[in-house]
Structure formats: structure tokens, C-alpha cells
Image: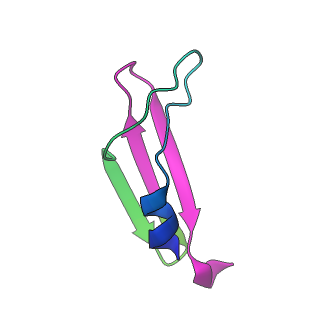
Amino acid sequence: MLTELHEAATPTCEAQHCERPLGEPALVFETEAGRREAHECACGAVTVTVARSESSR
């Protein structure tokens, strides 16, 4: 389910006055607890997304 949600979601930049859609993550860290991705926007901001795996709930 984590993969399905991740693939369906398109992260957007969290910087003030910027809502650009973000492409592929620059950095991915995955553990049993879930997945973290760092996305760098063209505006220079970095947005981190976090998704917990089903087994860690």
C-alpha cells in the first residue's frame, strides 16, 4: 500500500508563495519504518516527504 500511495501522490513545494510540483527525489532513505524523500525545487527550497509502512503502524 505504501508504494501505491507514493506513486499516486505528486509532492508540491512547501516554500512560501511556491506550489510547484516536484519531480524525482534528490535523496531517498528507506527503513522498515517507512520512506523519506528529499525533493529540491527550482526555487531553492527542499521539501521532505515521509510515508510510514503498513508494518510500522
For image coordinates 41% across by 67% down, the residue present is 30
For image coordinates 40% across by 18% down, the residue present is 43
Q: Is residue 13 above or below residue 1?
A: above
Residue at far front of view: 8
Q: Is residue 41 above or below residue 57?
A: above
Q: Is residue 12 magenta?
A: no
Nearest the camera: 11 or 48? 11
For image coordinates 43% across by 52% down, the residue present is 37
Q: Please state, as top left, top right, bottom left or bottom right, where the C terminus lies in the image.
A: bottom right
Choose top left, top right, bottom left or bottom right for residue 53: bottom right
What percent of the width, then of the height, locates residue 16?
A: 59, 18
What percent of the width, then of the height, locates residue 21?
A: 43, 34
Nearest the camera: 43 or 29? 43
What's the colour scheme?
rainbow
Residue at far top of view: 17
* Count of numbered marks: 0
What percent of the width, then of the height, locates residue 18?
A: 52, 20
Is 5 positioned to the left or the right of 57 in the image?
Answer: left
Range of residues picked out in magenta: 36-57
Is 15 positioned to the left or the right of 10 in the image?
Answer: right
Q: Is residue 46 magenta?
A: yes
